[in-house]
Image (cartoon, grey):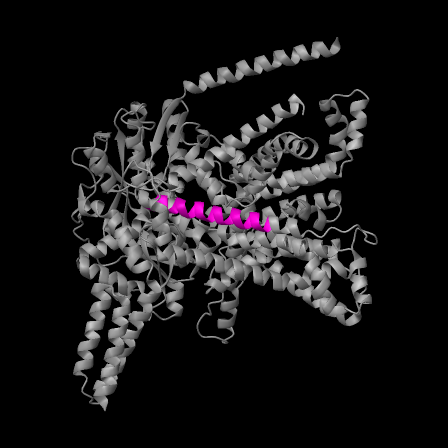
Amino acid sequence: MKKKFFRGRIILITIFLFFCSALMGEAQAQKEKIGWVGPIYKELSDSLMKGFKDYYKKTYGKDIEITFIRPGGWPVCVDKVRAWKGKPDADIFLGAGAPAHEILKKEGLIVPYKLKEWEVIPDKWQGMKVKDEGYYWACFAPWIVTNLYNEKVLKVLKLPPPKTWKELLNPIYRELIVQTLPYASGTQHEAVEIHLQTFGVKEGWAYNRLLAAQLARFSTGSVDTTHIVSRGEVPIGLAQPQMNAMVARKDGYPVRDLLPDKTILVPEAVAMLKNAPNEANAKIFLDWLFSMAGQKYVLEGGYFTARKDIKFTAWEKEGVAMAKHAREALGVDSFWDLKVGFVNYDLDLAAKRWDEVNRYYEYEIYRKWRELKSSLFLIEEVEGEIAAAKKKGVDVQKAEAKIKEARNLFEFEGQYAQARLTASEARSLLVGGSR
Amino acid sequence: MSRGNTFLSLILWFILALLVIYPLSFLIIESFKIAGTNQFGIKNYLDFFKDPYYLKTFTNTLFLGVLVLLATTLLGLPLAYILARYRLKGKTILTALILLPIVLPAYAGAFALIVFFGKQGTVNLLLLEWGLISKPINFIYGLHGLVFIQTLHLLPFIVLSLSAGFTNIDPSLEEAAEVEGARGFKRFLTITLPLCTPNYLAGAVIVFLWPFTDWLTPLIFGLIDFLPSIAYINISYHFTDMYRKYIGIVSVVVSSVICVAIFLISKRWVEKKKYTSLSKGTTLEGRIIEPGIFITILSYAYMVFIALLVLLIPTVLGLSAFSRRWVLQPFPTYWTLDNFRLIFLESPLLLKNSFVFSGVALIFGIIFGLPAAYLITRTKVRGKEALDFVITLMLAFPGIAVGVSYLLAFWEGIPLATHWIIMPLSLFVRRLPYFLRMAHASYLQLDISLEEAAEVSGANKLRTFFNISLPLLLKGVFVGVVMFFIMAFQEISTAIFLYRGGWETLPIGIYLNWHRGMEFGIAGAMAFLMIVIIFILLIIISRIGGGILGAAWGSSGGRY
């Protein structure tokens, strides 16, 4: 009897709990919501979530539930939005540079919204677009495709930081450089594209072959590159999202940004999705993101700020912890104070040949990396021998022509074995010439 | 055959179909898709086998497997012999020590090695400081470093399997050989070693197949050209290049097929070769020898050498756990407890996730494993061999195969991957054999007449199970439970594919903090915490299971 009584109670309690949880679910359904989709780092999404939740609670007296979907790099994020077929599961496309937002605009997946403080963001900067004139998207966290070096290790090695792309080819930096594969990182891909667009396709690939011979190793991603340089395992890292140096400095690593002579701006931007289910909240978020308060959370999330009226020194005084690291990593007081040489970057071309460039790099440079190095090193050896012979007054004309041919085969044709053979021929000509 | 058993078997098969066969079929289907079209075909496979690069990654992986197996065997053989045969003081502590590498994910060891042996690591910095070298020496980057770290990680598998082999040999066989004149080394080579081969093979297969599943450790050393590593890069970073993704999936399928094939061949071989003897003079300990003074000194020297090697990793992790900003300095200079404060106060989520996911996986494991073991050992239900086979096969499946197939299968249709339950589910599937083997072994040891007596006395099957079988099984089951928990706790290669923000576990936290957060101190503290937690668990099972060796080995894949 007693047992039955207990069983009855347990059933009642279970039913009660079930109803309670159902009611709670109901209450949750009425909660304010907003959804983001995009490729930003977790540190930034965490920081923005915290900041926006606090702001929303303070301003509207209500909690807001934020969902953030990061399915992968920006092309995957764009694919995700496409897959929603006009009924998006999010309101905001958060992050990614101009190419992503231009595609979204062209395909009618985002809608214009004029921010309350539209003017605080520059229209253009040194020829690069920072926001869309039709109010479709605006950059909230600009950064530059840059390189990075470990101050302490280069100092010990008594080497100056290389200032230009070409300087990286100096033999003093051999085996002191690390980069990732262009198909493992969007930023690395963009760096290769910068070379192709700065030097021309043929010369760009020649440059990448020579650069590959300088590398100590390949890393597995741009953040891995940052880490390897931070620890000093390899002192120079290529193709970095610029803010990585700032974040590494915050963690106490002696690294600095190394702006190359030619690069591009990545205007990490934000836009409102068409048919956003929580449009009102999306607008509130956009205005907050570009407010002084919102921008502080951007910086605390490890990204640079986009407003023209921000000075890091002023924020340092206000106690924004990251401002000091930003100033030290960049060496200037506002992001827009940087002096940068931009390449006239053709976005459409870059987007069109994205996979093709990756594959060429994989098949012609990465997979033949060993062969490439041994070929170039032999050419360099023979070149040295020719120079030495020339000094001694030996007739080196034929050998010189041959080694030039070898270099051509190496740099422009990518025929590493053939180049080796030709270099050997040049060497034998040299020996023959001296007789 | 009772109807109940058939029904039970059907339920278990349904679970296996849903969680193993269904997702793996997605993996296979995906590997036949042709990029840029809606068609299917064998083009990806043809491309894969025609491409000399993939052949190279395959031979590299094979070569790594051989090297690691050789190195672990050379290092492990003397140690296993010492542990199994000589009466020496302090053996228990050493046995516990050599288990340390198992409890840590291999990549955590790789991080520690970079801190200690890297170009700006402790050793190089000290040598530079003392003026012994002018440029850092490359100690670890390259194949040698990879072989070193994997050897360290996998050494326990060889030592445990070999020492189990040495212990199990009937002393009378060796004594007979000695009487016949085969003494010392000759006896060891002609009698002892051959008798150990089945046990050795059990461990050797795990070691040899490891490079086919571990994609992360090579990447940390900057080595990409291994089958699982290139598969990971191709799948994870394909962006919009579908061909890259499909080729990556083909690599996963190929490595899975290789793993399963090697596993099955060795399993058959072991079964054929199993030396069973009607024991006359054996004891639980096997043959124990009182070593002479020379052998004693040599044994201690060797044990200390191995202990130093093994202790290196936890020591470096421990130092970084209690310090901050240990970079470009031979030793930490700034000591703090801040790393632990961060873990406990600011992100206790990781700890909670680790316990919840492994715990839930364990509950699944018990709910599934006990009836499965019962069916396999106690009934004649049809298809029980197949059930055993499919479950055991999970031992051979690379984590990346489970991770990728779960992502493919459980996104749309059955959208499990959008809920955190996917984490414990995948852990459950991946670690299931560990629990099952233990429950299985316990069932075999349980005398069936006890159950029969209960049934004759009028108890039904369920009641017999709860009142008779379960209490008697508890010890073995409990060891299986803890071992399962440990293996689930340190899993990463599947989890890293499936986790989303908020579902991070301790192993994922270590990886992210090394890779993303830069701060090694927190990663070190997490790894240190893992060592402590798992070590406590190991001690618990050693108390219950009678000796760490037996307890751990009994369920960690040593027996088929």
Residue B255 on the magenta span: yes
How many circles with numbers are drawn on the protein?
Answer: 0
Q: Which image quadrant: the N terminus of chain A?
A: top right
Q: Identify which residue is drawn at 49% across, 34% down.
A: B21
Does residue B66 appear in the picture of this structure?
A: yes
- Give the side of residue A181 with respect to residue B475, left or right: left
B358, above or below B160, in the image: above
Magenta stretch?
B244-267
Foreground: B178 or B553?
Answer: B178
A215, above or below A251, in the image: below
Foreground: A192 or A293?
Answer: A192
Foreground: A279 or B356?
Answer: B356
Can you tell which quarter of the image residue A423 is in? bottom left
Residue B171: % across, % down: 80, 58
B413, above or below A205, in the image: above
- In terms of secondary structure, what is the magenta stretch mainly? helix
Residue B310: % across, % down: 62, 59
Residue A168 on the magenta span: no
B398, above or below A13, in the image: below
- Give the side of residue B354 with respect to residue B37, left or right: right
Q: Identify which residue is drawn at 37% across, 47% down.
A: B45
Residue A68: % across, % down: 38, 33
Residue A400: % across, % down: 19, 79
Does residue A317 appear in the picture of this structure?
A: no
Q: Identify which residue is drawn at 20% across, 89% down.
A: A393
Can you tell which quarter of the image residue A39 is in? top left
Q: Which image quadrant: the C terminus of chain A?
A: bottom left
Foreground: B209 or B315?
Answer: B209
